[in-house]
C-alpha cells in the first residue's frame, strides 16, 4: 500500500487526504489545532471550489447548514459611489469553522488517520521522505515516513529555505450580525492604502475581512477596534452597512502572504493550497484554489503520474489570477483611482467582466 503524510487539516490537506484514502492509500494527516477553530479568511467559496466539493459529494451538506449563495459583487469607492456586476457563476459564503470541520471529518471517515493536535516541526525530503511530528498533548516527538509528503500548512514554512518573505500586510477578520446589506452579494470597500470586504455566511452573519498594512496597525498599538473606527471614516458605504451591526466574534489577524509557485521542490514533497502559492485575497479564490490544487495532486498520485509532472500543473492555476488580483487590490487601495474608476464601472458594468474572468470567476 502506498502512503502519504499530509501536513495541515485545512481545505487542501483534508481534500487530498480524503481522495487518497478513498483510493486505497494509507494516509496520516497532521493538524496542530483543535477543531472547531476559526481562521483569517474572506470565507467565500468560489465556483471552482464548489465544483470540487460537488464531485466529492460534500457540497450539499454545506448548503444544508446555511451556506449563502452569492450572485453579484458590489464595489464601493470611498465617497460611496457604487458599481455592481453579476458574478458569472455563483459563489458561496461559508465560515471556515463549518467548512474545515466537515472536510476533516470526511477525510477521517474515508480512512485517514488524523493526528490532532500535533505539529510538524520539520520535513526530511528524499527517496523516503519523513517528518518530525510533535504530539501537543504529550509533547513527544515521533518520526513518521511515507512515500510522499503533502505540505498544506497554509504558509509554506516547512520547506528548505523557510517561508517566503513577509509582505508587510496583515489579514484581519471578524463576524457581524445585523449588517445593513444584501445577503446575495460580495461587497468590496476601497480605503486609504487598504481595502475591506463584506460577505454573508451561515447563521445570519457576515464575514468582515480586511487587508491592512502592518505599519498602520502598529500606529494604533495593535488596537484593532481603534484602527477599525478610523477605517470606517474612510468609506461612506462601509460606515452605513455597519452603523447598527453587532460584532459576534473576536478580531483575528495574521500576516498576509503573497507569492507565486516555486520552481523547485524537495524530492517527494508536494505543496498544496497556500503552501504552493498565495494570491491577493480580493478575488475570493483562495479556498477554491486550495481545493482544486489538492484534487489535482491527489488525482495525479492515484494515476501514478511522475511527481514532477504533477507539480508542473500547479503554476498555471495561480499565474493570471495572481496578477489580476494584485492589480485589483492596488486600485481598491487608492482612493484617487477608486473614485475615478467607480463611476465608469457603474455606467458600464459589463466592463467588469474581463477583470472577473482574469481573476477566475
Image (cartoon, helix red, strand yellow):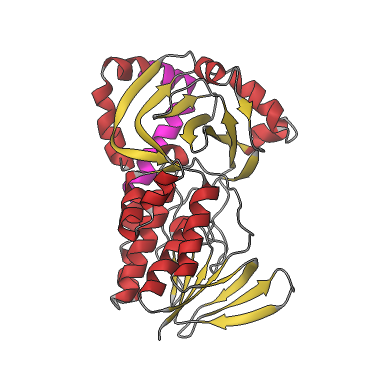
| Nearest to the observer: residue 5 or residue 124 | 5
Q: Is residue 311 visible?
A: no
As for residue 221 lying within the magenta part, the answer is no
* Residue at 59%, 48% in the rendered image: 38
At x 34%, y 60%, the residue is: 56
- For the point 52% across and 32% down, the residue is 204
Main secondary-structure element of the magenta-colored stretch:
helix
Residue segment shown in magenta: 319-341
Relative to 245, 82 lies left or right: left
Towards the viewer: 208 or 168: 208
Quick check: 7 above or below 222?
A: below
- Left/right placement of residue 193 relative to residue 148 reads right
Q: Residue 336 appears at what percent x and percent y? A: 45, 18
Q: Position of residue 299 (x, y in %)?
A: 31, 69
Examine the image and state in which quarter residue 358 appears: top left
Camera sees residue 312: yes
On the image, the x and y values in percent for residue 346 come to: 32, 17
Q: How many marks?
A: 0
Q: Quadrant of the C terminus?
A: top left
Amino acid at each position: 500500500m502506498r502512503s502519504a503524510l499530509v501536513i495541515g487539516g485545512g481545505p487542501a490537506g483534508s481534500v487530498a487526504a480524503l481522495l487518497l484514502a478513498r483510493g486505497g492509500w494509507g494516509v496520516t494527516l497532521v493538524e496542530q489545532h483543535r477543531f472547531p477553530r476559526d481562521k483569517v479568511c474572506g470565507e467565500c467559496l468560489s465556483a471552482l471550489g464548489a465544483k470540487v466539493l460537488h464531485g466529492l459529494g460534500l457540497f450539499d451538506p454545506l448548503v444544508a447548514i446555511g451556506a449563502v449563495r452569492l450572485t453579484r459583487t458590489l464595489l464601493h469607492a470611498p465617497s460611496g459611489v457604487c458599481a455592481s456586476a453579476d458574478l458569472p457563476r455563483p459563489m458561496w459564503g461559508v465560515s471556515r469553522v463549518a467548512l474545515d470541520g466537515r472536510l476533516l471529518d470526511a477525510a477521517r471517515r474515508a480512512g485517514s488517520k488524523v493526528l490532532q493536535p500535533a505539529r510538524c516541526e520539520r520535513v526530511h525530503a528524499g527517496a523516503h521522505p519523513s517528518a518530525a511530528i510533535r504530539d501537543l498533548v504529550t509533547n513527544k516527538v515521533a518520526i513518521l515516513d511515507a512515500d510522499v509528503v503533502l505540505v498544506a500548512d497554509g504558509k509554506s514554512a516547512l520547506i528548505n529555505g523557510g517561508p517566503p518573505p513577509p509582505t508587510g500586510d496583515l489579514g484581519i477578520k471578524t463576524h457581524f450580525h445585523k449588517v445593513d446589506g444584501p445577503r446575495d452579494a460580495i461587497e468590496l470597500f476601497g480605503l486609504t492604502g487598504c481595502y475591506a470586504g463584506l460577505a454573508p455566511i451561515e447563521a445570519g452573519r457576515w464575514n468582515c475581512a480586511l487587508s491592512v498594512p502592518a505599519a498602520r496597525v502598529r500606529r494604533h498599538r495593535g488596537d484593532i477596534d481603534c484602527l477599525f473606527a478610523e477605517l470606517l471614516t474612510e468609506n461612506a458605504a462601509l460606515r452605513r452597512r455597519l452603523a447598527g451591526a453587532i460584532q459576534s466574534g473576536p478580531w483575528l489577524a495574521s500576516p498576509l502572504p503573497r507569492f507565486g509557485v516555486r520552481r523547485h521542490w524537495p524530492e517527494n514533497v508536494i505543496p498544496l493550497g497556500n503552501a504552493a502559492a498565495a494570491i491577493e485575497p480580493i478575488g475570493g479564490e483562495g479556498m477554491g484554489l486550495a481545493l482544486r490544487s489538492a484534487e489535482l495532486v491527489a488525482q495525479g498520485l492515484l494515476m501514478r503520474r511522475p511527481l514532477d509532472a504533477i507539480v508542473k500543473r500547479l503554476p498555471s492555476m495561480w499565474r493570471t489570477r495572481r496578477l489580476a488580483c494584485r492589480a485589483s487590490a492596488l486600485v481598491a487601495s487608492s482612493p484617487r483611482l477608486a473614485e475615478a474608476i467607480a463611476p465608469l464601472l457603474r455606467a458600464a458594468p459589463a466592463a467588469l467582466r474581463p477583470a472577473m474572468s482574469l481573476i477566475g470567476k
